[in-house]
Image (tube, grey):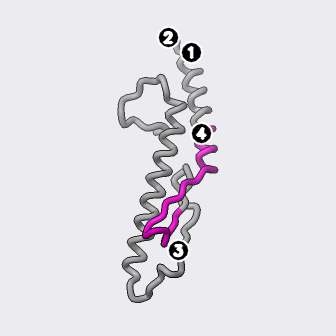
Amino acid sequence: MNLMKMMKQAADMQKKIGEVQGRLAGQTVEVSSGGGAVTVAARGDMSVASVRIDPKAVDPADIGMLEDLVLAAVDGALKAARDMAAREMESVTRGLNLPPGMNLPF
């Protein structure tokens, strides 16, 4: 394979990665904890889009439980967003024979 062809392939991949990242920034996933007491939406770019808390979940005498529910929902939403991003990036990296665990973009 010549150098020019490799450079073109790298540039094409970089463009595709940028396109996927743009799409991911507009996609969200939602995860709830505590039976829907706390719901968190995260974007495919790993940013948190929203947090909703059912007023019934707010107990001033047990703020620790609410904090745990928020943490669980945020962790779950970010994991779901990472999974979504990995599926999207797989379409770009398919056929590259990358070693397991090597994630793009770097």
Label placed on residue 28: none
Q: Secondary structure at mark 3?
A: strand
Per the image, the residue denoted by label 3 is: 53
Identified at 52% across, 37% down, the residue is 89
In the rendered structure, which segment of residues is drawn in magenta? 19-40
Q: Specify the farthest residue to the top.
A: 1
Per the image, the residue denoted by label 1 is: 5
Q: Nearer the viewer, residue 69 or 34?
A: 34
Identified at 48% across, 64% down, the residue is 32
Separation of residues labelled 3 and 2 (CA atoms): 56 Å
Is disc 3 surrounded by few (<14), some (14 to 19) or many (20+) residues within 10 Å? Answer: some
Q: Sequence order check: which comes first, mark 3 or mark 4?
A: 4
Q: Is 72 inside the magenta-drawn segment?
A: no
**Could you tell me if the residues under marks 1 and 2 are in contact, i.e. CB atoms within 8 Å?**
yes
**Could you tell me if the residues under marks 3 and 2 are in contact, i.e. CB atoms within 8 Å?**
no
Q: Position of residue 105 (x, y in %)?
A: 49, 38
Q: Specify the farthest residue to the front.
A: 35
Q: Secondary structure at mark 4?
A: helix
Query: Which one is in front in this view, the residue at disc 1 or the one at disc 4?
Result: 4
Q: Sequence order check: which comes first, mark 4 or mark 2?
A: 2
Amino acid type, label 3: Ile
Q: Is 5 positioned to the left or the right of 37 in the image?
A: right
Q: Nearer the viewer, residue 70 or 10?
A: 70
Q: Secondary structure at mark 1?
A: helix
Per the image, the residue denoted by label 2 is: 1
Q: Position of residue 73 (x, y in %)?
A: 45, 64
Separation of residues labelled 1 and 4 (CA atoms): 23 Å
